[in-house]
Image: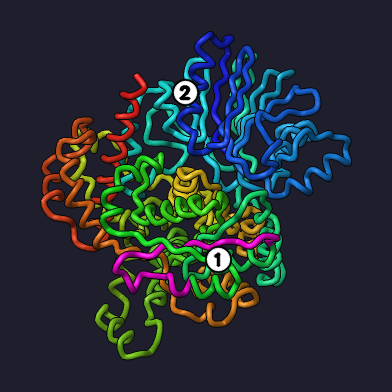
Amino acid sequence: MCGIAGFVSREPLGPEAPSLGAQLLRGMVHRGPDGEGRFASDHIWLGMRRLSIIDLGGGWQPLYNENRSIVLVANGEIYNYVELRENLKSRGHRFQTGSDCETIAHLYEEYGENCVDHIRGMFAFALWDNPRGRLILARDRMGEKPLYLHEKEGRLHFASELRPLITSGVTPFAIDPPSVDLHLHFGYVPEPRTMVKDVTKLPAGCTMTIDIAGWRTVTKRYWSMNDAPALAGDPVELVHEQLQEIGKLITRSDVPVGVALSGGLDSSLVAALAARHSPQTLQTFTVGYEGSVDSDERIDAQRFASHLGMPWQEVVLSTSEVVDGFPSLVERTDDPIADIAGYGYYTVMRTAREHGVPVMLQGQGGDELFWGYPWVREAAARSHLKALARRHGWKAFPDYWLAELPPTLSVRDVRRWLKKMCGISPAVSKIRNDLDTPGDELVFYNLNNEFVAADALTTRVYAKEYLDSLPSRHANTCFNGAKYWDDIDVALTSLICDTYLLENGLAQGDRLSMASSVELRLPLVDYRLVETVVGLRKTRADHADPPKNLLRKVATDILPDWVMNRKKRGFSPPVDQWLTGIHQKYSTDLLDGFLVREGLLHRETLSQLAKSPPSRGPLRNVWFSLVVLEAWCRSMKKLSFSSV
């Protein structure tokens, strides 16, 4: 695990190259505190900062093939490296280190750019094929490891984080205006865009090939969950098999491993799998909140850790710590991500490092893969109805009306149904809306309350010139396309993973763990598990099942009954207290801040928001997105000035 950076040029590099490379690496010391490695040639400079996890004494990068014609720097963990090494040795390859990443160089010798097809893990790498004068950049299938790109005039720079591209002077900080609208709607910027003009991300599941001769650049998608073959068989058995397999692979480490343990199903499942397969005793870490009872999971987590025989550590967050640390947290996320839960993630990772645990396991991905979010399940149901309306128009109305029947015959449900004109009123509203929106636009984020609130607020909060520059329904473009209607359930699984999971969950997980020099591993986003779930979903639609129904069935064979049956709490920090404190301390920063000076936001509307915090609800989340973005812009501008 490390941070990688480098650049490749059509023309031979000048004498400034070593200094520029050093500046790129200097911005990522937190990703690799154990040392660094560099490689330079006429047209290429590669560098890395190392966090030692496998082969502590010998796994230094760059890594090479036998005759050193292939040069590699890589960030991540290759979980199946033991199996790959044995296979490659049988083909005559000789290894110089025990590093998991060295397998990539030898796989390239065997399979060329298709080497990525054989890797099971999380990674971003840069591989220089010296005889061909070719650089290969690659990113893992689900996008756990990032790779930022800046290309201009026959030269391409890349780095594991955005900030080094700014602090090194590779590109000045200039905001990408369309991304501001995306951030306000989503709370993050969907890839491949970033908030910085002229900087993009290599998309997840993609490779990029740069040939020096003629300066030819080709980006290729090598994996998509949508391409998973349909799968028949016992769903519980098939998913259980994949979880057991990844449980064995993901606990391989030459350093201590821990688990971020809450009281929820996902993290409990990850802890149980790790305890079953790890040769070492794992430590567990749980976050709690000062003065909080309803949202505190420490009692449940401690009990389960004791059941597994795992040492348990708690960390208690105070409101003052969250409020005072808000600007630094925003800077650590690298991208602007408006998620108030981020400080909890960061604190758990920091505590793990303080206890000598540089590898952590976490349960992200379960909600996205197994229909854990109510609004995504509703989006699936609504999209299936819209598919009927696309074909039959108002003749589909009976299906809309049937969907409004009361869920039970209880007095409360029937009374609600009667008040809505026996379901006629909402059915009319929904079919009319579906027929009025673009036919290829899937029902997706436009059911998310924060997205809808942002859509309604744009005419008030955006400066007129900026508003006029945006295309109609700009934020909806990521879920607009004929391809989504072939298999709605699979499309929505892919979309929630490619948006919220990727740019909120995985991005925060990577940045806020690496900020404390901790490697984060996520068993529930293993691509073989993902392909299994999607393959089963192609055989049988399951969005109408109870939430996380399949995962719960699998977990009954792994978790004790008292864990399965306890009340769900979820990750629920004391949001009211935190946001009130942040509003009091930082809201006025918006009034004459960066976003106003850039002509993006309307000062008068911001003044109203600054006077009093929005009440609970979607509008408050939109306000928080604005405060996060302003704090992030100030931080990046400061970093840009410091590099001059």
Residue lying at 62% horizontally and 35% vertically, measured from the top left: 74
| Secondary-structure class at tag 2 | helix
The verdict on residue 26 being magenta is no
Quarter assignment of residue 602: top left
Say few, some or many: other residues with alpha carbon within 10 Å of mark 2 (under 14 / 14 to 19 / 20 or more): some
Front residue (pair 612, 207): 612
Residues drawn in magenta: 278-301
* Residue wearing tag 2: 23
The verdict on residue 294 being magenta is yes
**Percent x, y for residue 61?**
65, 31
Quadrant in which the N terminus is drawn: top right
Quarter assignment of residue 475: top left
* Residue wearing tag 1: 311
| Secondary-structure class at tag 1 | loop
Q: Between disc 2 and disc 1, whose residue precedes?
A: 2
Is 497 rendered above or below residue 566? above
Residue 322 visible in the picture: yes
